[in-house]
Amino acid sequence: MGSICKTFGGIVSLNGVDMKIEKNSISALIGPNGSGKTTLFNIISGFFPPDSGHVLFKGEDITGLSPNRIALKGLMRTFQIPRLFHKMTVLENMFTAPKNQKGENLFHSLMNWKEVEKAEDQNLETANRILELLSIEHLANEWASNLSGGQKKLLELARILMADPEVILLDEPVAGVNPTLSNKIFESIIELRNRLNKTFLIVEHNMDVVLNYCDWIGVMHRGQIFTEGTPQEIIKNEEVTQIYFGVA
Amino acid sequence: MVLSFILDTLIYAGIFGILGISLNLEAGFTRLTNFGKVAFFAIGAYTTALLTLNGAPYIIGLIASVTLAAFAGFLISLPTLRLRADYFAIVTVTSGEILRVFLSSEEWLTQGFLGLAGIPRPLSNLFGENYLLFFTLLVFLYLFFCYLISRRIIYSPFGRVLKAIREDEIAAQSLGKDVFSFKAKSLIIGSGMAGMAGNLFAHHLTFISPDMFLPGITFSIWVIVVIGGMGNIAGPILGALLIETFERGMSFIKDYIIMPIEPLNFRIIVIGLLLIFFVLYRPDGILSEKKLEMSMEKLQRKRGKITD
Amino acid sequence: MEVNIAQLIVDSCLIGGLYALMAVGLTFIYRIMSFPNFAHAEFITFGAYAAFFANVSLGLGLILSAVIAFFATGVIVVLSYFAIFARLSAMGSKTMFPMMIGSIGLGLVIRHIIQELMGPRVLYYNIEAPEIYEFLGARATAIDLLIIFISIILVVALHLLLSRTTIGKAMRAISDNVNLAQVSGINTHYVIIAVWFLSGGVAGFAGMLRGLDTYLMPLLGWNLLLPAFAVVILGGIGSFYGAILAGYMLGFAENIGVIALFSLNISNSYRPAIAFSILIIVLLMRPQGLFSNFKTRGDA
């Protein structure tokens, strides 16, 4: 129970959500559109304050902190529609990610150029590795605005991986990505979880990857966590299929 | 005669180039719609005027101009930076007007509408006849300095965060960047540079009064940045050269050609039309923003150099 | 300290009415086109000078001059919309910035064309010396009273327009939610043009009133930009009633403030600081103003 987030209550779109995320797990939130998944993400990551309830992270109450403070504490998220820096190249987008870069301090960037250069070289190697992992290294010097929809999703993913937080919230990370690459991505997610002790919470509609790769699934419906459990349990749950494919 | 006109134009181009670089940093790279540049310009000018008229050496005037203007930038950033871009624009433009009221009313300090005259010129005793040439070179020295600083900032990780803020504040926040702090720093640097420009302005004209600091100046600087290219580091310099040549040219010509239109009005109408034209048809300006090419080959080449 | 309350009320109603009328057009355009129109100040100036042309150069009476001010400004404004803002608006999202810049350019052009044609010096309308009335301790000229009452009448007329007529209701619908209005069958294209026309017309009319109250000069409108924005922000962007209420509130605040300045021995030229302070305070404490409820911080 290392990194936990627990929230309950919320704006009209969330009606009493109580959730615990296990450290080092790969958890997923599924549910029809409008069930409150993205709102939950917004609250957890600090972009929206909840009307009531708390978010606890590693034992600390982070409710209401500004998003950048929460990000610095090690909890970051991606966005449903990728928020890329359009008038910057793919590599530049990657380079914005690492936290606490010396060069971001005005004084150092003016005076300490040698050190900044070294850090930048380091960034370049890391960035290229991640881009190769996601098979988009050939786009390194492209304007981010020139990428296709799927490529933009990959870049957002690459960027947050570069930022290296402990807990990563992914909002539909493989929407618009072909199945082979999707699987490859999720395999990397598993590797990251194993090797680097990361925790993932993923919103997805793609049931294949969710059932194949996640440890825990929460099903949201109308602002509440309707049911939860392991993939095996969820598959057997008839109400889940009803929510997704029937009239609920 | 013609020479002094050319030097005068170059001096104005240099001063406005500095102002343009400062605005480009704020608006072109950080998307701070600062419509109150003239206020920091005026602070720089009045600070050095008051100090040097009271016997302080030029260098003190210079330091004070930059520092006080930068500090004013800091003060204004506190309540306003969290506002939306349009509110920020409204507040900055009105702040400029309030400052002008202050400068006109506090006669004990600023002599109000009479202005401050007789501002000493630095090192004037050394250069005598060639003073204008010296001052032109001085202005370009400052311009070059500001250019280097802005270049260093833009190509640094710090500048990268500014651009990120410009592109998508929310994404920048989600990566842990303290957006307010970066915006404030951008504004402070920009204001300091504007103060430097004001310093040069005061010493060049040797007379300043509140009517010289109308919002028209802020808008001229915006034209310079929009035309030159927002997001290109050298853009404002190009813009300043073009606009100031035009402006000074107009004042010069009116002595020799009878124009059907009052030159002042003509100048400003042209500036207004340029703004409209560029915003409709060439929003990126003349010089466009450059890509930062980074590649593994470049890195390897550099590595190779180091190990030799 | 003795305060002439009756005079205070008279003065405040006068300038308050002017502020309200000036802000109405600005607040609508701000809401519908999503940008602060810095050229609005020059619409006010244009109206004042159009009336001057009618009144002094053509020798027409005040009423006719007022009508001309209204329509001439309205036409100029609609032309500007077609030339500049309609095109910018069609250029995709994030158009606020180019429209702000465009409006500044437009303002500069209008102001300096006026200055070129009419000269930079102060001008006056052709009216006989007005009678002066005194009651309950307040002094007001016939012109002052005229302005006060005409402002009120125009406000009422606008209110009727917005609440009783089809076009008025359409304007309010667009002001609320452009997309929804479009979907519900309103021809937003025409209504927007109508809003620009009205915005310009009322501004021009207000400009003439201002010229009657004081005098004409090219910076007439620009000097009112700050109070106009203060009123719009205080009232809430897009709110007609907010603009009216805030206009009168600012009128009172300024006149009370002037008395305060006087008693503190501060120069009268700091009058704009009152509007400025109100602007800052509202933006810091309740940016949505009195009557509005939309997002005010970034684009969360």
Image (spheres, helix red, strand yellow):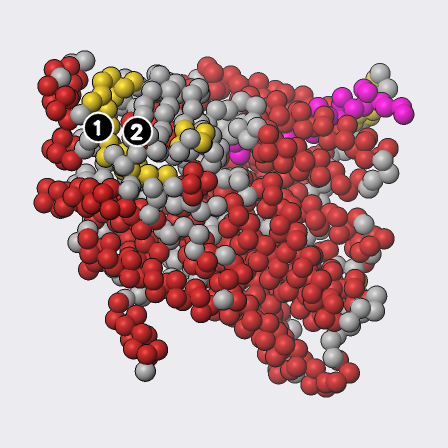
Q: Which chain is disc 1 placed on?
A: A
Label 2 in the same subunit as label 1: yes
Residue at label 2? A21
Looking at the image, which residue sits at the far front? A1
Q: At 43% across and 55% down in the image, what residue appears?
A: A101
Residue at label 1? A216
Secondary structure, magenta segment, majority class: helix
Neighbour tally class for label 1: few under 14, some 14-19, many 20 plus, Cα within 10 Å: many
Q: Is residue B172 above or below residue A136?
A: above
Q: Is residue A91 above or below residue C280?
A: below
Q: CA distance from mark 2 to mark 1?
A: 9 Å
Q: From where the camera sits, is residue B83 visible?
A: yes
Secondary element type, mark 1: strand
Residue nearest the viewer, comparing B7 with A14 = A14
Residue nearest the viewer, comparing C251 with C130 = C251
Quadrant of the image occupied by residue C193: top left
Q: Is residue B174 left or right of residue B134?
A: left
Secondary element type, mark 2: loop
Q: Is residue C77 left or right of residue A17?
A: right
Q: Earlier in the sequence, mark 2 or mark 1?
A: 2
Q: Residue B36 location, x and y as percent? A: 60, 50
Q: Is residue B231 above or below residue A225?
A: below
Q: At 31% across and 51% down in the image, what residue appears?
A: A162
Q: Amino acid at mark 2?
A: Ile
Q: Residue C23 location, x and y as percent? A: 58, 31
Residue nearest the viewer, comparing C56 with B138 = B138
Disc 2 + disc 1, Cβ < 8 Å = yes
Q: From where the camera sits, is residue B257 visible?
A: no
Q: At 59% across and 33% down in the image, what residue appears?
A: C284
- Labels in figure, total: 2
Q: Which chain is disc 2 placed on?
A: A
Magenta region, residue range? C1-28
